[in-house]
Amino acid sequence: MIYGDCGTGGDLDRALEAEGVERIPGPHCYQFFMGTADFEALAEEEPGCFFLTDYLVRHFDRLIVKGLGLDRYPELLPDYFGNYTKVVHLAQLADPALRERAETAARRLGLAFEHRMVGYGELAGFVAAAAAPPPAGG
């Protein structure tokens, strides 16, 4: 298993520490998919980004629309998304259908759209390091 935090406020870190398990560094998956330097630069330059991974695009209706109650209370849309300026799709796969769904999600939220093909970013390095045998004599 690979663990990355996503808004637990440190609860995940405490649980993993108690089990002696390391997690991917960073506050959430957007950072490790995009890469720390690129993520921090974009967050500084354009703080109004709402990020979607491929997983969030696939489950947008269930997690965002229904999860936030926008299907029942559409008047909440400006309350939730009024301070965002655009949706940034951090694509792991080059999939035109997912890209179209991400664009549809951006339109649903009334936001501009940006697509970034980021692949798995820093995840690959983390997995390789975690899978590497321990140093000899250690």
Image (cartoon, rainbow, N blue to C red):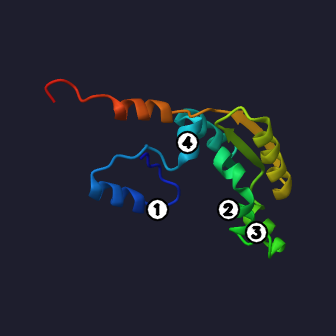
Q: Amino acid at mark 4?
A: Gln
Q: For mark 4, what is the residue?
A: 31
Could you tell me residue 78's position as x and y percent?
A: 80, 66
Q: Earlier in the sequence, mark 3 or mark 2?
A: 2
Q: Which mark is residue 63?
A: 2
Q: For mark 3, what is the residue?
A: 79
Q: Amino acid at mark 2?
A: Leu
- Please name which of the two marks, 4 or 2, marks the residue nearer to the observer: 2
Mark 1 lies on a secondary structure that is loop
- Quarter occupied by residue 108: bottom right
Left or right of 8 in this view: 92? right
Residue placed most toward the observer, 80 or 61: 61
Residue drawn at 24 percent across, 30 percent down? 134
Residue drawn at 13 percent across, 26 percent down? 137
Q: Earlier in the sequence, mark 4 or mark 3?
A: 4
Q: Residue furthest bottom?
A: 72
Could you tell me residue 65's position as x and y percent?
A: 75, 64
